[in-house]
Image: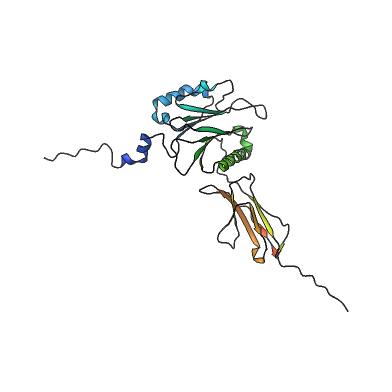
Amino acid sequence: MRHKRRERKQKRGKRGGIRARLAANPHKPAIPTIVLANVRSLENELDYIRLLRSTQRIVRDCCVFVFTETWLSNSVPDSAIQLDQLTCYRADRVLVEGGKSRGGGLCAYINDAWCRDAVVVCRHCSPLAEFMIIKCRPLYLPREYTAILLVAVYIPPSSSNNRSEALNELYQHINEQQTAHSDAFLILAGDFNHADLKKKPKPELTSDLKGAALTGNSVTLSCTLKLQSAGWKFYWIKPTQSTETETETHHYFIRSVRVSDGGQYKCRAGRGNPVYYTHYSDALWVNVTGEYVTALHIKW
C-alpha cells in the first residue's frame, strides 16, 4: 500500500522571496519602511504608539516614524517624548509672521537598529510651510547611494491660496541639499493638504536680441527657471532637429548665426539619475536676415 505524500507546509520558492528576506532582516531594506501619521498632539498619542510597537511586529521593526502636527514647544523636553530604541528628531513650530506659534510641528523617530548616523541638515518654518531634512547613513545601503535624505513636511491648510509658493520654498531647500549630496536617495513624507507635488516647473526662454538677427552676428538664448540652482542641465530643440542639444549652463550661444539657424526654439531642464525633466518652455522665434548693403547712387 502506497503512503500518501505529506503536503508541504510552505510552497516551493517561498523561502527565497523578498518578503521572507525582509522578515528575516527587517532592518536591512533597500528602501526604509516608514510609518507616517498626522497625530495632532504627539504627547496624547504616545501611549497608543507604544501599544502598537509592543503588539505589532511590523510597527516595531519599522525603520522611520514621521509625525506631523506634533503641537510641541520648548516647554516639552526630549525625554518626555522618547520611545525605546528610537532616536528623536524634532522641528517645533516657531513664532512666524502673523504671530501664530501654536499647532504644527514635526517629529521623526529613527530606529537605532536601522541607522545610528543621522543628522538634521535643515529646519524651516514659515507661514507657508514647515519641513525638516535629515541626512541618514544607515548600516545597510545599496552601493548606488551614499546617504538617504529624509524630508518631513507639513503644509498647513491656511496655505491653500499659496500652495505654489509653499512648494517653491520646499523645492529650493531640497535643491540645495541634492546639490550638496548628489548621490543621496531622496524620501519625501508628510502632510501636504492637497498640494500638487506632480506639477513640474516650466522655464522661460528669452533672447538677447529684440528684433531680427543679422547673419554673422551672435545670438544668446537663456533658459531660466524661477528657482535657479546648481545641478541642472539644459536641453534645446527646434522642429528641424531630431535630437536635443545639451548644455551645462542655462545659456545657448550661436556665435556666427546663419539663415538656417532661424526658427522656433524650445528648452527644458533636467537633473538627477534617472533624469527628472521640467516642462518645455514656450516657443521662441529667432528670425535671421541677410546683411544690409548700402548703395550710393551718383546722379551726373
From the viewer's perspective, tell me whether residue 67 is left or right of residue 19: right
Residue 20's quadrant in the figure? top left
Residue 167's quadrant in the figure? top right
Residue at 38% from the left image edge and 35% from the top image edge: 25
Q: Residue furthest right?
A: 300
Instruction: Please tell me whether residue 201 is drawn above or below residue 110 in the rendered image.
Output: below
Instruction: Please tell me whether residue 218 is drawn above or below residue 271 in the rendered image.
Output: below
Quadrant containing the N terminus is top left
Total numbered labels placed on residues in the image: 0
From the viewer's perspective, tell me whether residue 167 is left or right of residue 13: right
Q: In terms of depth relative to the viewer, which is nearer, 115 or 250?
A: 115
Counting from the top left corner in percent of width and height, residue 31 is at 45, 39
Residue at 53% from the left image edge and 23% from the top image edge: 78
Q: In terms of depth relative to the viewer, which is nearer, 66 or 176?
A: 176
Report whether residue 279 is seen: no
From the viewer's perspective, tell me whether residue 187 is left or right of residue 227: left
Report whether residue 270 is seen: yes
Quadrant containing the C terminus is bottom right
Residue 286's quadrant in the figure? bottom right
Q: Residue furthest left?
A: 1
Q: In terms of depth relative to the viewer, which is nearer, 129 or 116?
A: 116
Counting from the top left corner in percent of width and height, residue 215 is at 70, 65
Residue at 61% from the left image edge and 54% from the top image edge: 267
Instruction: Please tell me whether residue 189 is drawn above or below residue 251 in the rendered image.
Output: above
Counting from the top left corner in percent of width and height, residue 103 is at 59, 26
Residue at 62% from the left image edge and 56% from the top image edge: 266
From the viewer's perspective, tell me whether residue 2 is left or right of residue 22: left
Counting from the top left corner in percent of width and height, residue 60 is at 42, 28
Colour convention of the picture: rainbow
